[in-house]
Image (spheres, rainbow, N blue to C red):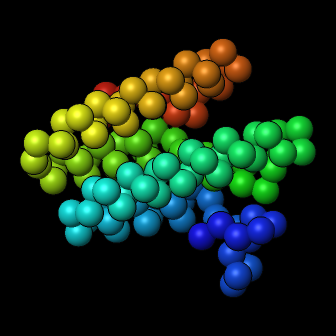
Amino acid sequence: IGVGGGRHPYGFRPNPVVYNTMIQSYANIGDASSAEAILDRMISLYSSSLQENLGSGAFRSVRPNTRTFNMVLNAWSKKGGAECGGRALSIWKRLNIIALEEERNGETYSRPDVIT
């Protein structure tokens, strides 16, 4: 997902629902690493879109939300293993950094909730 111009080759524009569905699919099969990779991709696309066209780049809509972070955290919590706690903490910290940035801009799209 994510080619030049912000559209998939089949014509749809990726959005959080598409990415969240992919994350949930990876989580369902126990592939927390791939779920996190999708989150990383969303963050990267969204961040680069903020730099384009005065903040209205092609992937501005690919903004991870609280649900996105919660699904990846859940994937790591179900996986188990030595590295899982560290990965979950890293994701939680990224969520908090993004939430603080959004709060400064008067937004509340991604922030920890009772599930997080």
Number of numbered markers? 0
Q: Residue at x 49, y 49 (%)?
A: 40
The image shows residue 9, relative to residue 69, as above or below, that is below
The image shows residue 12, relative to residue 85, as above or below, that is below
Give residue 104's quadrant in the image.
top right
In the foreground, 43 or 12: 43
The image shows residue 69, relative to residue 42, as above or below, that is above
Q: Judge from the rendering whether residue 13 lies leftward or rightward of residue 92; answer left or right.
A: right
Q: Residue at x 65, y 67 (%)?
A: 2
Q: Position of residue 45 (x, y in %)?
A: 65, 51
In the foreground, 82 or 13: 82
- Residue 24 visible? The answer is no
Furthest toward the front, the residue is 83
Give residue 24's quadrant in the image.
bottom left
Q: Judge from the rendering whether residue 80 lies leftward or rightward of residue 38; answer left or right.
A: left
Q: Position of residue 30 (x, y in %)?
A: 21, 63
Classify the position of the C terminus by image quarter: top left
In the foreground, 24 or 76: 76
Q: Residue at x 37, y 36 (%)?
A: 91
The image shows residue 4, relative to residue 87, as above or below, that is below
Q: Position of residue 111 (x, y in %)?
A: 47, 28
- Residue 98 visible? The answer is yes
Q: Judge from the rendering whether residue 116 lies leftward or rightward of residue 79; answer left or right.
A: right
Furthest toward the top, the residue is 104
Q: Residue at x 76, y 40 (%)?
A: 50
Q: Judge from the rendering whether residue 18 lies leftward or rightward of residue 30; answer left or right.
A: right
